[in-house]
Image (cartoon, rainbow, N blue to C red):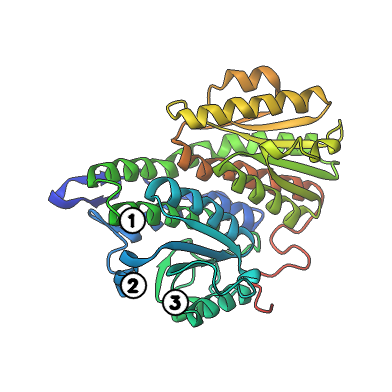
Amino acid sequence: MPPTYTRSGGRPLLMTEPAKPSRVFPHAMLREIYEQPSVMLETVRRNVAGDTLFPDMLQPIENALFAFKKIIIAASGSSRHAGLVGEILMEDLAGVAVDVEYASEYCYRSTHAGADPIVLVITQSGETADTIAAQREAANRGAKTIAISNVAVSTIVREASAALHTHAGVEKAVPATKSFTTQLTVLYLFALFLARKRGRMTSEVTRVHLDRLAKIPALIDNSLATWEAQTLAIAKLHKNAKAFMFLGRGVHYAIAREGALKLKEVSYVHAEGLPTGEMRHGPSALVDENLPVVMLATHDPADPDSVLRHRKTLIVLEYVKSRGGQPVVIASEGDSEVAAITEHVISVPAAVELLLPMLEVVPLQLFSYHFAVLNGANVDSPRNLAKAVVTE
């Protein structure tokens, strides 16, 4: 029987339980990629009760949630990329002004930048030195802080005004995979919370969003085997590449950056994530037959803005192809326009625009994994990296 969490009135919101990984994985990174559907589901379960998002978790800053003028997100690495997605989620769904800072830079920014903010800090470990420093500086400036962390007993949680927990479980591999997608899950829920709090979304509309979110883990689970085969084949094709370019528009730009970070973390090959529209403003000089260009070209046909961005992305894809570039495209299922331009297409299931990042990041993780393994890198413990950066 599938698990449920209940709405008021006893009506259940069904959530399909993804199958737990049963195979023996050669690396923790690959196992943790496969664990993502179940931990995303657990993150929703633990943060939603009936019609209530984050029951009691934000109660300590209830007054600030009515009075704040903007949100500042401070984070580093993959957590900052999650924050970039969160920025668009909160602005589009809740109408909230959001700035995203590098945690390492926040302390040195003007103390007069904005009035009455809430500062949201994101860190998997809860012990990231730059992020803790940013949170302490925010508190010194009189701001309320919200920590998003995977570790409930951690410095950042202890010192925050309020805390929201991801429930990814222990992540043994240094590269963030399941901790990243659970951060996206919490940020999506937080955007819905703000939309309800600010009167921009009815309870019925919130339920529609929750229904859509509840389907994402099963969509990932059902696609993992196909994505793994496809990404392994593409990794073999580009095994000798020395650099990669990742491109994405709108909310997908953050995922392009995350895909590039993941690849360079685990394989030691240079990769850069850029907004798709910026490629022709200089970086196009790099495009030739030796440069794989990974493009995020997913879209929601029911969203006019998403359709427009997709059409603009197709123009850039054609440009890359015409210049001898080697495009690898993450596209929505059934996208015949992308398939007509390039043969190297990885398809993700249909979803609304703001949920597509949770789907498209997973094949990018798998591609980074296979490319690194093929090149003999230690994917679980890459050189010069640690799970938590505890010194500035």
Q: Residues within 10 Å of mark 2 (few under 14, many from 20)?
A: some
Q: Residues within 10 Å of mark 3 (few under 14, many from 20)?
A: many
Could you tell me the amino acid type at mark 3? Answer: Ala
Residue at numbered disc 2: 61
Q: Earlier in the sequence, mark 1 or mark 3?
A: 3
Could you tell me the amino acid type at mark 2? Answer: Ile
In the displayed structure, 176 sits above or below 333; it is: below
Q: Residues within 10 Å of mark 1 (few under 14, many from 20)?
A: some
Pick the quarter of the image with the N terminus: top left
- The residue drawn where x is 29% and y is 49% is 3
Residue at numbered disc 1: 193
Q: Secondary structure at mark 3?
A: loop
- The residue drawn where x is 72% and y is 23% is 318
CA distance for labels 1 and 3: 19 Å
Q: Nearer the viewer, mark 2 or mark 3?
A: 2
CA distance for labels 1 and 2: 14 Å
Residue at numbered disc 3: 160
Note whether residue 300 is visible: no
Q: x and y percent of residue 226 in the render?
A: 58, 34
In the displayed structure, 302 sits above or below 375; it is: above
Could you tell me the amino acid type at mark 1? Answer: Phe
Q: Earlier in the sequence, mark 1 or mark 2?
A: 2
Q: Secondary structure at mark 2?
A: helix
In the displayed structure, 286 sits above or below 267; it is: above
